[in-house]
Amino acid sequence: MNIIGIDPSLTSTAMIINDKIFLYTPLYCSTNKKGDLTKWYDMCNPYITYRFTDYILDNNYSKSEIEKLISYDIIAEKIIEDIDSNLDETFDGNIVGIEGYSYSSSVGPLIDLVTFSTILRKKIYDKVTSNIYIYAPTSLKKLSAELTYPLDKKGTARNFNDISGGKFKKCDMMESIKDNETFNDRWSNFIKNNYETLKANKNVPKPVDDINDAYLLSKVVKKNHNL
């Protein structure tokens, strides 16, 4: 099976295809004023294929809403193209895991994210596979914990700080990658080798946080289908 994990975002959509990593992001999110990649985008560069996206929205509300649709459609098509060109034809079928919406987001960005994600899901359904699994953020946290940590007597996976998976934050999810002894690929090794530096930040920096989500999605899908 081709395993695909996608973490949709308006500014930093991460995708894993059979351990190949892609990131779809506007230039203004990933570069400085000189046009160079900022620190973590540069450090991740050897591990990621960047697809830079950019669009300028019209000041007119009606026109800007239509331009959003056009922009989201273009990005979704780029994602489909990358999926098509990176599928292993020797594998039998495709499985896609996508992270769902966080309803704690503010209304405006949430509506735009729903619009983009809906366009993307429909294209995947029509052009790649109907074998799509959508994981709520809380479910992904819980299942990510279960990839790494044993279940307690109540059936709950807790990390070494006694935090249950359902209460994981981005830093805990990153830590679960670091703690997992069975993960031994380029991205998990990057996390393990740079963990202390990453941990020193107030928040897990972009694009690491989004890639982690897509990475763990792909691992959860693989485990859930015994692959």
Image (cartoon, rainbow, N blue to C red):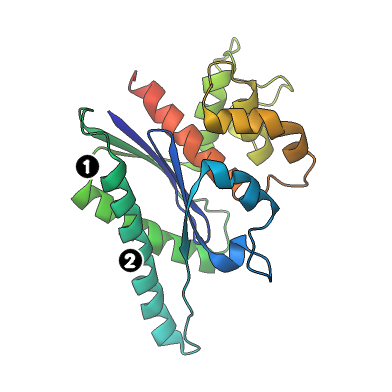
Residue extending farthest top = 153
In the image, residue 82 above or below residue 131: below
Tell me the amino acid under the disc marked 2. Answer: Asp
Q: Which residue is mark 1?
A: 130
Q: CA distance from mark 1 to mark 2?
A: 19 Å
In the image, residue 116 above or below residue 155: below
Q: Which residue is mark 2?
A: 73
105 or 117: nearer the viewer? 117
State left or right for residue 59 relative to residue 115: right
Residue for point 64% across, 26% down: 178
Tell me the amino acid under the disc marked 1. Answer: Ser
Residue extending farthest bottom = 60
158 or 29: nearer the viewer? 29
* Location of the N terminus (image quadrant): top left
User: Is residue 121 visible to the viewer in this orientation of the structure?
Assistant: no
Instruction: Name the quadrant containing residue 204.
Output: top right
User: Is residue 15 visible to the viewer in this orientation of the structure?
Assistant: yes
14 or 160: nearer the viewer? 14
Circle 2: element type = helix
Q: Residues within 10 Å of mark 1 (few under 14, many from 20)?
A: some
